[in-house]
């Protein structure tokens, strides 16, 4: 998993070649996994991957 960018309350991440964006508290599906963006800061993100 790679953090592409983070800031202004949103993060863009890459996982197994798939890329997606999420805001703090939002859960997205990425590369057949559930990814929750628990916290988003400037150039940082706390993720919960299921």
Image (cartoon, helix red, strand yellow):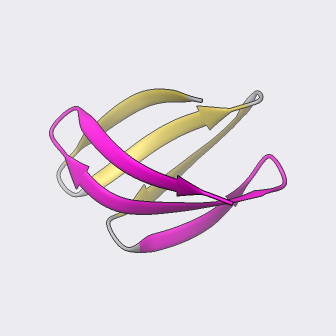
Residue under the image location 76 percent in, 27 percent down: 17
Quadrant in the picture for the N terminus:
top right
Q: In this view, does 41 lie to the left or right of 49?
A: left
Q: In this view, does 1 lie to the left or right of 26?
A: right
Q: Residue 14: say if magenta.
A: no
Q: Give the image location of residue 40, x and y in percent.
A: 26, 53
Residue under the image location 31 percent in, 54 percent down: 10
Q: Give the image location of residue 33, x and y in percent.
A: 76, 56
Quadrant in the rendering for residue 26: bottom left
Residue under the image location 32 percent in, 44 percent down: 45
Quadrant in the picture for the C terminus:
bottom right
Residue under the image location 32 percent in, 66 percent down: 24
Q: Residue 49: say if magenta.
A: yes
Q: Is residue 22 left or right of residue 32?
A: left
Magenta part of the chain: 26-50
Camera-side residue of 36 and 19: 36
Q: Give the image location of residue 14, x and y in percent.
A: 60, 33
């Amino acid at each position: 998993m790679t953090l592409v960018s983070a800031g202004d309350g949103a993060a863009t991440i890459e996982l197994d070649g798939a890329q997606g964006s999420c805001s703090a508290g939002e859960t997205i599906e990425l590369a057949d996994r559930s990814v929750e963006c628990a916290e988003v800061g400037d150039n940082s993100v706390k993720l919960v991957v299921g």
